[in-house]
Image (cartoon, rainbow, N blue to C red):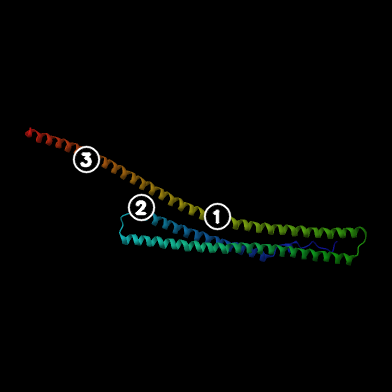
Amino acid sequence: MSRQERPNLQSMQTEPSIDRSTDTEDREHSTSVKDSSQAADRKYGLQEQLREEIAKHLTEGGVGEEKLQERVGRIRQLREALREEEEKQGVSREKTNPSEQAEYIKAKEQRERLKVHHGRVIKEEMEKIEREMAQEQLEGPQRELQVLGGERQLLLLQLEALRTEAQQAERDLEAQYKRHRQEMHCVRTESVQVFRVFRQVCEEQRRLSEGRYRTVMLEAIQDAVYLSAVNQQLQTDNTQLRKALAEMKDTLSVPGS
């Protein structure tokens, strides 16, 4: 097959627009993950401020009415801001899921287009080989060599097509894994922050409860000691009064005798 040339394997490569689209999607997803991380930081900051204000409200006593109202107002504002931030993040997550599904569908369509493109190239090459064989009209061993050469070219094209499709599928899988890992990192970071705030609040409540319990127990002990002392004093006074009363009776009974 001297007139036939090696098939152009470069024509089997993925179209450049697909790679650029994948890069664009990665940049957009990185921006989305960065925004999610910033939102988690804002939420954590609000949680910290709310925790500090609640701790001050619980631990600091004896403040004036105006100071108390001001502190309660700040706590309400922080709670409202935290609620709004959680709603925003909730809406963002709802928008993220359809986006991920759309990216999966888009990648699947790209692989389908790539497969169709490879089928078209293979078909064109097969038609080209058939035309050349019809023009040369060789016989005997040369005819067999010509057929074998054509089959070899088609096999090379098919192998290259499979390799290119596998590479595209691997790139899509790697991009999907990267996005999933970044999302899991954001969720894990947010969960750790929420758990840290919850644990701090629980520790503060436990310390406050223990402090109040100790204070109540100390006051109860002090009251018990005080009441015991008062009771002893009353008993002593009662004994002395009875003794004095008895002496007065004895004194009054002597002259009458």
Q: Secondary structure at mark 2?
A: helix
What is the crowding at mark 1: few (fewer than 14 residues within 10 Å), some, or many (at least 20)? some
Report x, y in % for residue 112.
71, 63
Q: Report the amino acid beneath label 3.
A: Leu
With 57 as the anchor, is 136 left or right in this view? Answer: right
Q: Earlier in the sequence, mark 1 or mark 3?
A: 1
Give me the disc on residue 234: 3
Q: Which residue is disc 2 drawn over?
A: 59
Report x, y in % for residue 162.
74, 58
Q: Earlier in the sequence, mark 1 or mark 2?
A: 2
Q: Residue at x 59, y 58 (%)?
A: 179
Figure quadrant of residue 252: top left
Figure quadrant of residue 159: bottom right
The quarter of the image holding the N terminus is bottom right
Q: Which residue is disc 1 drawn over?
A: 185
Above/below status of 109 relative to 241: below
Figure quadrant of residue 31: bottom right
Front tag of 3 and 2: 3
